[in-house]
Amino acid sequence: MQPQSIHTHRFSNGLMLIVEEMKDVQSAAFTMMVPAGSIYDPPGCCGTASMLADWISRGAGELDSRELTAALDNLGLQHGESAGAEHITFSGATVASKLRDCLRQYSVVLRQPHLDEEQFEAVQLGAEQGLRAIEDEPQRKAMVELRKRSYARPWSHPSDGVLEDLPNITSEGVRAHFRRHFHPNGAILGVAGNVDVPELIRVIEDVFGDWQPQPEMRIEPGNRGPNRDFIEHSSTQTHIGISYESVSLDSPDYYAAWAAVNILSGGMSCRLFTEVREKRGLCYSVYASHAAMRHEGRVLCYAGTSNERAQETLDVTIRELRRLGEGIEDAELDRCKARAKSALVMQQESTRARAGSLARNWFFLGRIRTLQEVRDQIDALTVASVLDHVHRRPARDFTILSLGPKPLDYSVADEA
């Protein structure tokens, strides 16, 4: 793995730039994270940020929606916009020689969007269709509802919004969200690829340098949802969501926590797949993931099964989560490390992946974890270190949600 050439530069208006030079590639990519995500949605208007992420690229500066799309296509830019909990994120990748023009175009999108009233109805319809699609996908709905009960408000707010709030979201409300939250201070721009750093700084100073900072909003955490809940859903299937506390991304235990979850759910040879699905045939889908946020982390688990086997599936899954502390085999950790190193190789070859990683690292950590550092941390993992983490942070204090025709008995979660 080649040493990384990473540079940082904070502009006078607060915009933070992180650049990784990749001279062996012909492409360049960027990720711009603007602090305007769903945690800033006004009360009763969950989905405002998501609608702005769609609306903002429908015309900007001198270009209407079609002209803007054509201009980006002519630059060969593969791009996307999305709203998350903390940010609205803009990302794109193109040939390195076109990056300057792409950044100039996106400076117009971020600073001079039309937010045209005639386009708002299409944005509303798109938001409604997306949320109704979730209602038709009970597995996805179960995990959205699990997150709503697992995190403190407003981090529990679904970034896509909720159906019942859609009538409350007006075009002027979305414009107000833009005016309030689109500013350079707190924004992070990650760039990776075949770039000249001094020239890139000059280009960004030219197109973003006079972007005016504004006061940043402070978010106070609110209450969490219930830790046991049931949503009635007429179906032949029951969907089960389970979560419990883990560590944040900046924790010294992060890689041990990540490894523990990957031993549970990192492929077809993992614990949950083999013990819950293959050996007992209890469910058609089961997995766990580590969801690390800036201020906390949790393990999120899902199991989908028939109504007849739902209770047994819940009981066995909880017991498998707890059983991890009884021992881990060397082969399980070896497979986990191999998967991680394969992912690192693929990330090293993707400028878009690297740009996104740079921006997220800076937000979560205030620094960059190099690929070599990540590799060293993975190599340093041992069965003993992972077990030590599991013993100090065992699976307990579960939040459980089931979606199906009848509620389940959650008493297994309270066993000592």
Image (spheres, helix red, strand yellow):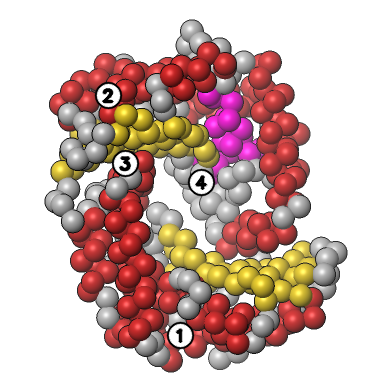
Report the mark closest to the observer, 4 or 1.
1
What is the secondary structure assignment of the residue under circle 3? helix
Snapshot quadrant of residue 406: bottom right
The x, y position of residue 191, in whole percent, is: 29, 36
| Residue density around tag 2, few if under 14, some if 14–19, many if 20 or more, within 10 Å | some
- Type of amino acid at the residue the image marks with label 1: Leu
Which residue is at the far top?
62
First along the sequence among labels 3 and 2: 2
**Magenta span of residues:** 36-57
First along the sequence among labels 1 and 3: 1
Question: Label 1 belongs to which residue?
Answer: 324
Q: Is 146 in front, or is 296?
A: 146
Residue 97 - label: 2
First along the sequence among labels 3 and 4: 4
Residue 38 belongs to magenta span? yes
Residue 85 - label: 4
Structural distance between the alpha carbons of marks 3 and 4: 24 Å
Report the mark closest to the observer, 3 or 4.
3
